[in-house]
Amino acid sequence: MDQREVRYELLHPDELNDIVEKAPIAYVPLGSLEWHGRHMPLGNDAIKVYEICLKAARITGGVVFPPIYWGTECLKLRALGVRDGTVDVDYSTFKAFLLDIVRRIMKQGFRVIVLLTGHYSREQVSAVKEVAEICEKITESVRPKGTPSVKIIALPEYELSLDLGYHGDHAAKWETSILLYLRPELVDMNKLTDLLGIDGEDPRKSASKELGEKVVNTIVKRLCELVKKALIELGV
Ligand SMILES: [Zn+2]
């Protein structure tokens, strides 16, 4: 790809036209604002999948929309007297918002839409998959008239690396490793004095940049394969 810029908000209209003509692919990174241990930022989930989407788009072409940080069903530690940083929205708000966004993205002529969620609460994953199904299957009632068919790839990023052992932890071995690789300046292991709000293996003993690189590379490669397959199925 000779495409220089993939970040949607930085494109000029002529650049957007060129991209949609060449590769009508839209990546939409979805995350949350919630406690991710004492060593990682509140927005980890969106930051993680945003970086993954940027890497994929630089291979497949297409655009990456700004990450959506507003997630649903996030971790709450307030009962423990902790300011957890969680600012989430209700399931119905999240789903309605996402549905609107995907419909508007379709109007711009994108044919393959990737909804990659780095936050995988039960409600968030189900909203993402339901929106994908609505937009793909109940097309005529939901899709703007005259819009061609679309393929929507909707999943949490860990689903692309299950065989490596990553099943989606929370600020533990895997998420810490991934951020150590993608945005090391955002991780401060010295702050990790306890494992409050961490679900998975102790990252102090198990996380590494090398593991992060391995899992990210696997996810990016497989995501690109899914996108290319979708383009072929659409005849694009
Ligand atoms: Zn997370």
Image (cartoon, rainbow, N blue to C red):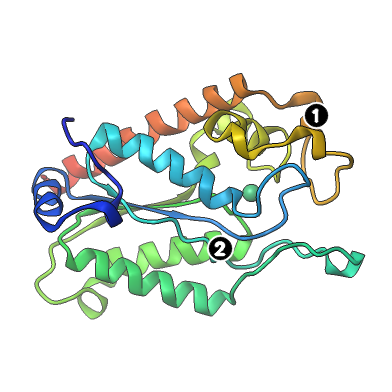
Whether residue 49 sits left or right of residue 234 in the image: it is: right
**Nearest the camera: 126 or 219?**
219
The residue under label 2 is 124
The residue under label 1 is 204
Q: Is ligand 1 less than 8 Å from the beta carbon at label 1?
A: no
Q: How many circles with numbers are drawn on the protein?
A: 2
Badge number at residue 167 = none
Whether residue 164 sits left or right of residue 53 in the image: it is: right
* Amino acid type, callout 2: Gln
Q: Quadrant of residue 108?
A: bottom left
Report the quarter where the C terminus lies. Answer: top left
User: Residue at left 22%, top 64%?
Assistant: 106
In primary-sequence order, the first of circles 1 and 2 is 2
Instruction: Select label 1 or label 2 by which is in front.
Output: 1
How crowded pointer 2 is (Cα within 10 Å; few <14, some 14-19, many 20+) is rated as many
Looking at the picture, how far across and down is residue 127, in whole percent?
A: 50, 67
| C-alpha span from label 1 to label 2 | 28 Å
* Amino acid type, callout 1: Arg
Q: Secondary structure at mark 2?
A: helix
Looking at the picture, how far across and down is residue 124, in whole percent?
A: 56, 63
Outermost residue toward the top in this view: 210
User: Residue at left 10%, top 43%?
Assistant: 22
Q: Examine the rendered structure and indicate whether residue 29 appears above or below residue 204.
A: below
User: Residue at left 59%, top 54%?
Assistant: 43
How crowded pointer 1 is (Cα within 10 Å; few <14, some 14-19, many 20+) is rated as some
User: Residue at left 18%, top 30%?
Assistant: 1
